[in-house]
Amino acid sequence: MRAGLRSRPWAGLDVGSFSVKLLAAQPGVGAPRYWTAEAMLPAADSDPERPPSAETVARMISDCLGAAGFTARSFRGISMGISGPDVIVKQISLPLLDDSEVGPALRFEARKHLPFDPVGMIIDFQIIGRYPTERKLDVLLAAVSQDHAEKHMEPLRMLGVDPDILDPTPLALSNAVVSRADVGTDARVLLDIGNASSHLTLFQRGEPFFTRRLDFGGRRLTRAIAEGTRVPFEEAEEWKLAAGADEPGLRVDWDSPEMQAVADCLRGELVDELRRSFAFYRTQGHLPDPLKLWLSGGSARLPGLPARLAEMLGTPVLLFDPLAVVDDGHRGTETPGGPQFAQAYGLSLRTA
């Protein structure tokens, strides 16, 4: 190993449908040092019905790297998140086996749990519980089609590198919330609101792992604002971004037409889905009462959103900013953190 190799940063790369988020972590004495950067999808390529091309995403990744002061080859490794309807994460039980036997056994067992033929799929696993008295293992099974993985990695390969780790979004989010000591030791429940969809993850030791992909995202909030105020979608998106900026350039009031539209959208499309998800989980495992929900993603930056969601759900909702506890001396750039970096943070923890 070359001298200083392990001191190089490890990068977490979250490639979404609206922006690319980079969070790099460098080991150090006392605490790691962090760099963050975000690159937005160009307005000319912002078509809700058509995903951006690999070339466009490659430029966004390159812009992200440049903003943080890196190149694609600057890192000790890169973890890249992957999501979509055909990315599957499921907890299953196996007979008590040695670690070396789990992989081969899982190939046969996976056929019982996957809606697709395991042939042509990338399958990985993580042992989360070993119970000798019950002669069983609890395992997280993760699977994705080879084609989906190849398409997801294509933009990064255009920059001359391959990801060292490809991690499903729910696992990256779980890693992020579990790593933060201030979150507590009870159920770690995180709702990450993406642009096109959201991910709900629930982790607590000794209980079933749960994740659900929701067809609700920041794009739907923008559409609600546009419809509620009768303005073009692009104008509504501009308003939402300004309201959620680090230094909002406008006064945000929940009695305003824009925020009333946001509240109606949350109440009508998200809150019931969350309640159904929690009710379903209670048929499988125990949940503390009251349940504490953490909120991340770009739309979580809307002022007062956690408090308003808490009123609707009747349970505490807090903003999850993965770098909120990091002092300025350990920030590698002036770029602030924020709830939009939750997945990238979880990915940066997955060093090989």
Image (spheres, helix red, strand yellow):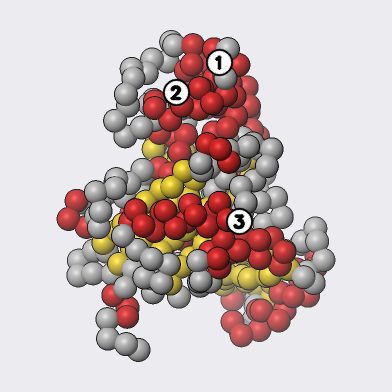
Query: Could you tell whether 263 is left or right of 176 in the image?
Result: right
Residue shown at the point (40%, 42%) measured from the top left: 339
Mark 3: amino acid: Ala
Mark 2: amino acid: Trp
- Res 129 seen here: no
Q: Which residue is mark 3?
A: 54
Name the image quarter holding the N terminus.
bottom left
Residue shown at the point (66%, 65%) measured from the top left: 150
Measure the C-alpha gap from mark 3 to mark 2: 28 Å
Helix, strand or loop under label 2: helix
Residue shown at the point (63%, 37%) measured from the top left: 47
Name the image quarter holding the C terminus.
bottom left
Residue 28's place in the image compared with 18, above or below, is below
The image shows residue 292 at horizontal and vertical percentages of 45, 38
* Of marks 3 and 2, the one in the foreground: 3
Judging depth in this view, the residue of 175 and 197 nearest the camera is 197
Tell me whether circle 2 and circle 1 mark residues in contact (CB < 8 Å). Answer: yes
Mark 1: amino acid: Val
Residue shown at the point (72%, 64%) measured from the top left: 147
Q: Which residue is mark 1?
A: 231
- Res 147 seen here: yes
The image shows residue 347 at horizontal and vertical percentages of 46, 60
Q: Which residue is mark 2?
A: 239
Q: Quadrant of residue 252?
A: top left
